[in-house]
Image (cartoon, rainbow, N blue to C red):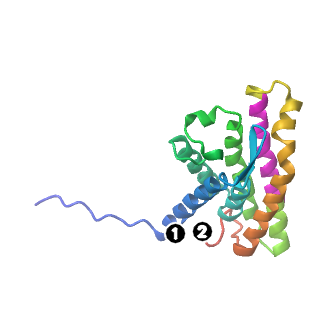
Amino acid sequence: MENVPPPAVPMPLHRLHGMVRIALYAALVGAGAFIHVPVGPMHISLQTMMIMLAGFVLGPRKAALAMLLYLLCGLVGLPMFGRGRAGPASFVGPTAGYFLGFVAGAALAGCSTYFGGGRWRRMAARIGFGFVGSVILLLAGTVMLWYRFIPDFNRALLVGFYPFIVGDTVKMIAAAIIAETFFPGVSGRGETTDA
């Protein structure tokens, strides 16, 4: 009698749905890189808004996975980074530290999904965790600038932190409003109820 392989077990639909959402937010962060205004060696883009939105909607684990997928796509050559750049060279340039901050910032913003309750409680959690995530994201980039390119830390802050903190806070609040408008439900377990 021939050996017949067992039938393939289909992937549960909720797992597939979660994977698609991770890929979607990775793509949104990539798309946000193309909407930018140059500021010296850096640029202001919609990326940070999409990173915060990923955290607010996906929760910490899936948001971090979305950012890792985004970085992997850019690493292998897809034009996902600012100004259409890609490849390993992007991980040694002046913006390299921010890439690490993307993962941490999205995960921190995602911690807001542990707080259910009314609208104002959810918004307060999103804004609080989103602000901390934004600061960590910018500090990661600033520390790398200081370590590799600008020997004076105060000057690194002037180049890599201060010009962006107000704009990133505004974009984070916009992401919180979008998340509350379109994805208000949270489970209190770090994932949205529709994940």
- The C terminus: image quadrant: bottom right
The residue that label 1 is drawn on is 14
| Camera-nearest residue between 165 and 10 | 165
For residue 65, side relative to residue 163 (left or right): left
| Quarter of the view holding residue 49 | bottom right
**How packed is label 2: few (under 14 Cα within 10 Å), some, or many (20 or more)?**
some
The residue that label 2 is drawn on is 195
Please tell me whether residue 139 belongs to the stretch shown in magenta.
yes
User: Measuring 79% from the left and 69% from the top, which residue is drawn there?
Assistant: 177
User: Measuring 75% from the left and 27% from the top, which residue is drawn there?
Assistant: 149
Q: Main secondary structure of the magenta part?
A: helix
- The N terminus: image quadrant: bottom left
Residue furthest out toward the top? 151
Nearest to N terminus: mark 1 or mark 2: 1
**Magenta span of residues:** 128-146
Residue furthest out toward the left? 1
The Cα atoms of the two marked residues, 1 and 2, are separated by: 7 Å
Q: Amino acid at mark 1?
A: His
In the figure, 43 relative to 46: above or below? above
